[in-house]
Every structure is written in C-alpha cells, then in structure tokens.
Amino acid sequence: MRASIKEAISGLSSPLKEEMEKIVSSPVFDATISPEDFTSLSLVTGLSDADLRVALLPVAAAYSIAPISKFYVGAIARGTSGRLYFGANMEFEGVQLSQSVHAEQSAISHAWIKGETAITDMTINYSPCGHCRQFMNELNGADKLEVQLPERDAMLLHQYLPEPFGPADLGIEAPLLAPVNHGMTAHEDDALIQAAMAATNRSHAPYSKNISGVAIRDKAGNIFSGMYAENAAFNPSLPPLQVAMVAMNLAEVRHEDIQDVVLVEKANAVISHLQDTQAVLEALNPDIPLAYLAV
C-alpha cells in the first residue's frame, strides 16, 4: 500500500480508522467502497451519510500526484449502484497544464471504467473549479447530481453552475456515462490492441466524432484501459491516456512501470490524440513504445 494512503488512514478518528484498515488490507480492495461496507462504516462510526463521505476524503486525496502544485485534492463519486469511487488530481511534469487530471474527473473516470452509467453525488474536499463544474455537467443525470463539500450542506450541481451549457444545447441526447457501443473491431490478435478497441467503443465523442481509446500494459503484464470523454465546452474534455492513467494510479501502479501503450482512434477525424499522447509519454519516459491504430 502506498505510504500516503497508510498515513491518511492513520489520521482518521477511531473507529473509522480501524474499520478502514480492515477494508484497505483486503486483497480485493480497489479504491472503492461497496454499499455494504459503507453502511457498516456508518453504523460503526455513527456518522451520517454525508459526514462519512467527507471523513473519507483524506483517503481519496492520498492518491493525488501533484508534483507541480503540491495541492492534493480528493473526490468521491457515488454511482447508481451505491458504490463509492475514490479519485484524486494528477499532474505531469514536462507537459502542458491542460493535460492534468482534476480530482472530480478522476473519480468520475474511475466509476466509468468500472461500469457505472450515472453518478448520483460527488464529495470533494475543495469547492469544484469552473472546469470541473462544466465537466460534471456532461454527465448522465447532471441535473440531479448533488455536490457535497466539508462543513456545507449538499447542493445540486446546477446551483454551482447556474444557467448551464451542456450536451442538450448542441442536440446531443446521449450524455457522458450513458451506455454506448460504437461497434468498431480490430483484427489484430493482441490483448493490448483489443483492450484499446474495447475502450474506443465506450468513448464519448459526440462533438468531434473522434471515438478513441488507450490501453496501457505495465511491467507485470496488467492492462489498464481508458476512453475519451469529450465535453460540450471542448476544453474540459479528458483524453483517453489520462483515463487509463487514472485506472493505473488508483490500482497503485506507478507510471514508471508502464511497459507499452496502444492508442486507437477514428481515422481522418477532425482532431487527433496522437501528438498529446506522445508528448505525455515522452515526458514520463521517452523509451515507452506507443503503437497507433487509426480505424
């Protein structure tokens, strides 16, 4: 377990500290809290739903990678299944700040990767920036999404983002996280390419139409996939490489352990992720091989 996570748990009040130590020591712990475990934590600690989520924020923030800002943000997204998904901000030295991942994006991506089709509430240790308010407005169920901050009453996202501009304003009926399958196939019998293609088929790119996905293989042979999450305002869009690296980070796999990467995207699209993907990987390690497939 990462030292920052151990430190965060050790700083929790009893009995939450002892119960979380049991949960995270499980070999199947994956930076999520099941509905059953959350109910048990609430009963043991006597904390309300909102207070318990806020109390867990230091554990989420312990996943933060912030070498530039040294500002550690944690977020917890709850999917319609009732499961809670940790997320944290991620920064990459040597590349544009626009390639950073915000904590809200991390938690939402985490839930998306693991099959959630909507988010019911977000808990964050700092007020969401405008970038993240706009990103969350792309979500399936954004009009009902509740945002919980420490020492504040929960508020609807649209109270933080009044008169919102979103997918419906551009005639898009399928929001982010809504189930989709673009039906594209790859003939290559390669697990990494097939994983990237599967992610491509789940991507959300209704504006550029550049459906795209990334798969990363680490040195142990594990594969982490990420799909493109486009936004009606364009700039808050989240590239597929970052979504895959969110999955790596929350699985406690270091970026130094990346073995190879595949990027799949639509051929002849009006945009491309190739240059930015190359730039980020070059900054992490110039020796990481990147395979590229345009279909």
Image (cartoon, rainbow, N blue to C red):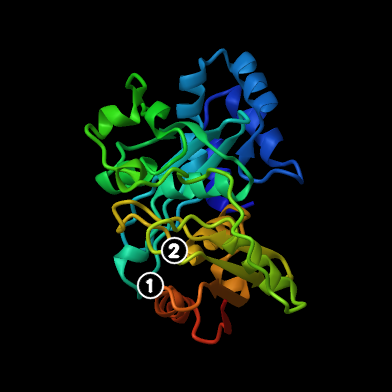
The x and y percentages for residue 66 are 39, 58
The x and y percentages for residue 187 are 73, 77
Label 2: element kind:
loop
Badge 1: few (under 14), some or many (20 or more) residues near its Cα, within 10 Å? few
Residue type beneath disc 1: Ile
| Above or below, comparing residue 87 to residue 67 in the picture | above
Residue appearing at x 74%, y 76% in the figure = 190
Q: Please state the total of marks drawn on the protein image.
A: 2
Q: Which mark is residue 90?
A: none
The residue at which mark 2 appears reads as 209
- In the picture, measured across the screen, residue 4 lies left or right of residue 125, that is right
Furthest-left residue in view?
A: 163
Label 1: element kind:
loop
The x and y percentages for residue 292 are 56, 81
Q: Which mark is residue 271?
A: 1
Badge 2: few (under 14), some or many (20 or more) residues near its Cα, within 10 Å? some
Decide which of 136, 27 is in the foreground and name it: 136
**Quarter in which the C terminus is drawn:** bottom right
Residue appearing at x 26%, y 42% in the figure = 165
